[in-house]
Image (spheres, grey):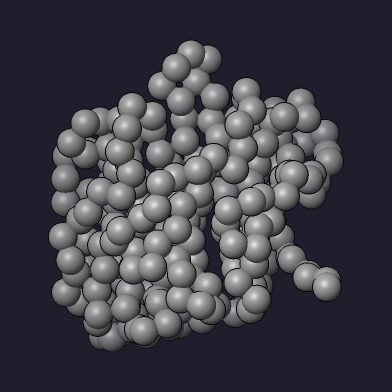
């Protein structure tokens, strides 16, 4: 059995200077999420809003309102039509955990619910739903213990409310971060992320049939420049 996985990622030179590129693309949106200094905002189809893309979108609506940081939103429209959103927030304890809200119509949303908690920091969630209805979530966790390595974590749920215990996909010193999780039509899970385990940042990837056992990570890229943010 063969599966084809296509990855896109950002490449940065060793010096840290961003490479400027210009691309043209067609984008279909059901929900467009942006981050503002004041918190997470949502733009949904509705009243016209002038944008360069020429899409008719409603005015942004704030979804969170707190004194801390709300970042890294991962939106999903589930098979039953319910909208889900998972993001990182340092509200309450200032350490950083993952939170979840949901909505049946994109207008009225549930109250925020914390789905991870502990002494370590949880960041950059990537949420997906498999054809069998199971929700899968990957993110990176920065250890509270020196030298503070970061590793890729994973957990799953049947309703996005009650989650199984998180398990580590990676367990290495250094930096494993910015994961992207996807599920194919056979419910097989793929997770790609950026790692400095080879000396500089490259894209690495692993797969699992059910989330219980993961294949050994393999390098997808190998370049002297840094490769980040797979998608």
**Which residue is located at x 38 percent, y 29 percent?**
120
* 146 displayed left or right of 48: right
Q: Position of residue 21 (x, y in %)?
A: 69, 56
**Which residue is located at x 40 percent, y 62 percent?**
157
Is residue 71 positioned above or below 141 on the image?
Answer: below
Name the quadrant of the N terminus.
bottom right
Q: Is residue 85 visible?
A: no
* 212 displayed left or right of 1: left
Name the quadrant of the C terminus.
bottom right
Q: Quadrant of residue 60?
A: bottom left
* 199 displayed left or right of 40: right
Q: Quadrant of residue 203?
A: top right
Please count the marks in the image. Answer: 0
**Which residue is located at x 30 percent, y 50 percent?**
115
Q: Position of residue 166 (x, y in %)?
A: 44, 45
Q: Position of residue 162 (x, y in %)?
A: 30, 58
* 37 displayed left or right of 158: left
Q: Position of residue 178 (x, y in %)?
A: 55, 45
Q: Is residue 210 visible?
A: yes
């Amino acid at each position: 059995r063969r599966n084809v996985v296509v990855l896109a990622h950002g490449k940065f030179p060793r010096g840290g200077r961003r490479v400027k590129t210009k691309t043209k693309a067609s984008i279909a949106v059901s929900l467009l999420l942006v981050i503002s200094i004041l918190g997470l905002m949502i733009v949904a189809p509705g009243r016209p809003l002038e944008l360069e893309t020429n899409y008719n979108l409603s005015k942004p609506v704030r979804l969170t309102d707190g004194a801390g940081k709300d970042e890294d939103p991962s939106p999903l429209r589930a098979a039953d039509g319910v909208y889900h959103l998972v993001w990182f927030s340092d509200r309450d304890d200032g350490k950083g955990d993952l939170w979840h809200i949901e909505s049946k119509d994109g207008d009225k949303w549930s109250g925020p619910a914390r789905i991870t908690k502990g002494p370590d920091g949880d960041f950059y969630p990537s949420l997906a739903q498999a054809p069998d209805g199971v929700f899968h979530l990957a993110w990176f966790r920065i250890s509270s213990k020196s030298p503070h390595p970061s590793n890729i974590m994973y957990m799953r749920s049947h309703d996005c409310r009650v989650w199984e215990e998180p398990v580590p996909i990676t367990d290495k010193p250094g930096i494993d971060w910015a994961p992207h999780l996807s599920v194919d039509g056979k419910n097989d899970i793929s997770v790609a992320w950026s790692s400095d385990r080879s000396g500089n940042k490259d894209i690495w990837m692993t797969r699992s049939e059910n989330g219980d056992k993961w294949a050994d990570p393999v390098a997808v890229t190998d370049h002297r420049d840094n490769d980040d943010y797979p998608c």
